[in-house]
Amino acid sequence: MNAEVFEFILNKVAPLITRHDTKWRLAISAKERLAVTLRFLATGESFASLSYQFRVGESTISKTVSETCEALHHALANEYLKTPSTEEEWLEIAEDFHIKCGTLVDTEDADHRLVEGTWRKDGPGRPGNSSMAAKQIRDKLKSYFVTPAGQVPWQENYI
């Protein structure tokens, strides 16, 4: 992510995540709160690892990531994440997902019984949900979310 995009996002969420200094401690800046959250979302690093990198406690990282994700959703959802409003739109999305990803996810049949997705099947080398099978599913989902049917409007500008 370049600096311009970071600043754009920061300007959107800063009013929601800015905290004030107290007599006992200095507040973590909105810029650092956003940086921690984006690092977590981009890398999946543990809170312990982020705690050492940013010199902030693990519980503070946990709370910061949670609050900042809520703020990101609140600030960006209306503009960038259109939620389908009709049943037809939902069905179209479901059909596109099913075409691209097959039966990866669990579903229900007409009698409300669980129909297990392929992610639960045995993977190569060991029974259950193996890491190889998980990687294949991740790659399949990734390929879906970079197609026109699965991507969000602003995504193309930042990949």
Image (cartoon, helix red, strand yellow):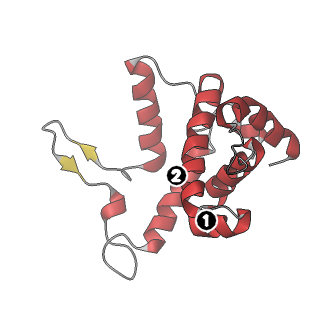
Element type at mark 2: helix
How packed mark 2 is, by other alpha carbons closer than 10 Å (few <14, some 14-19, many 20 or more), is: some
Element type at mark 1: loop
Give the left or right position of residue 81, taking residue 126 as reference.
right
Residue 106 appears in view: yes
Report the front residue among 90 and 147.
Answer: 90
Give percent across and percent down for residue 11. 78, 32
Amino acid type of the residue that numbered disc 1 sits on in the rendered structure: Glu
Residue under label 2, please give it.
Answer: 141
Residue under label 1, please give it.
Answer: 45
* Circle number at residue 103: none
How packed mark 1 is, by other alpha carbons closer than 10 Å (few <14, some 14-19, many 20 or more), is: few
Q: Residue lying furthest top in this view?
A: 86
Report the front residue among 159 and 35.
Answer: 35
Residue beneath the point at 69% across and 51% down: 25
Residue beneath the point at 66% across and 61% down: 56
Sequence order check, earlier mark of 1 and 2: 1
